Image (cartoon, grey):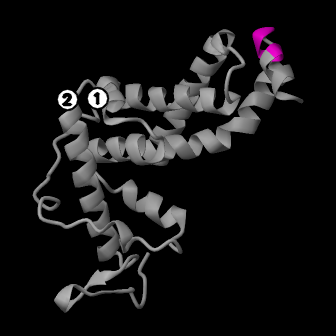
Amino acid sequence: MTEEAIVQGCLNNQPAAQQELYSRYSPKMLAVCYRFARNREDAEDMLQEGFIRVFTQIHQFQHKGSFEGWIRRIIVHTCINHLKKNKKFNDAVDISNAQNVMVREDSVPSIIQAKQVIECIRNLPVGYRTVLNLFAIEGYTHREIANMLDIEESTSRSQYTRAKAMLEQILVQKRIILQPQRHGEWVAAAHPRF
């Protein structure tokens, strides 16, 4: 079924088209939800809420740009709304561990598998995880993030900086990335623990 046929079928409330849309896009969108959620159950709830919005708003798709990108934006906004509704974004964040960690942009080797990094991102406090996902992965600006989350732009920037520092600390603790040695040298972890 072509993308155009799926959209038209969904506009006509055809179950086959709705099933095709869900089957085709839900695995990728579950991965998006999984990055924002603390566990699989929350991710699945976000996914279901997101696809309900996709089906109810499909008449707003203007065939400009990517259909998958349009779906993704709805899913991301659904994740943010889910976190806000459940007050999970406002949980207290212990920043004492992240304040003094120096971030090295070159410290994450390209050979690290995405799944390992995503698992580490999921260990971040929800505020850090949300801003990191929105800025570094989804490509939103700090101004857009501030508007989405009802926070100051400076808060988004500081949350992102602290999220990177805390993520680096987690990656080092799990021995996934290079470890600091004396005299500022960095060496690869010998036996990664997962």
| Residue drawn at x 77%, y 16% as measured from the top left | 10
Q: Which quarter of the picture shows residue 8?
A: top right
What amino acid is at disc 1?
Ala
Q: How many marks?
A: 2
Q: Position of residue 191 (x, y in %)?
A: 42, 89
Q: Which quarter of the picture shows residue 20?
A: top right
Given residues 1 and 155, the one toward you in this image is 155
- Residue 96, magenta (yes or no): no
Q: Main secondary structure of the magenta part?
A: helix
The residue at which mark 1 appears reads as 146
| Residue drawn at x 53%, y 62% as measured from the top left | 115
* Above or below for 90 versus 115: above
Q: Left of 127 or right of it: where is 134? A: right
Q: Circle 1 — which element?
A: helix
* Above or below for 115 versus 21: below
Q: Where is residue 102 in the image (x, y as percent from the top left)?
A: 20, 67
| Residue drawn at x 86%, y 21% as measured from the top left | 5
Query: Which quadrant of the figure contains the C terminus?
Result: bottom left
Query: Which quadrant of the figure contains the N terminus?
Result: top right
Asked if the residues shown at circle 1 and circle 2 are in contact, with their CB atoms under 8 angstroms apart, the answer is yes
What amino acid is at disc 2?
Glu
Which region is colored magenta? 8-12
Residue 125 in sight here: no
Given residues 140 and 191, the one toward you in this image is 140
Q: Which quarter of the picture shows residue 156?
A: top left
Q: Left of 79 or right of it: where is 2? A: right
The residue at which mark 2 appears reads as 152
Q: How crowded is mark 1: few (under 14 residues within 10 Å), some or many (20 or more)?
A: some
* Above or below for 11 versus 167: above
Q: Residues within 10 Å of mark 2 (few under 14, many from 20)?
A: some
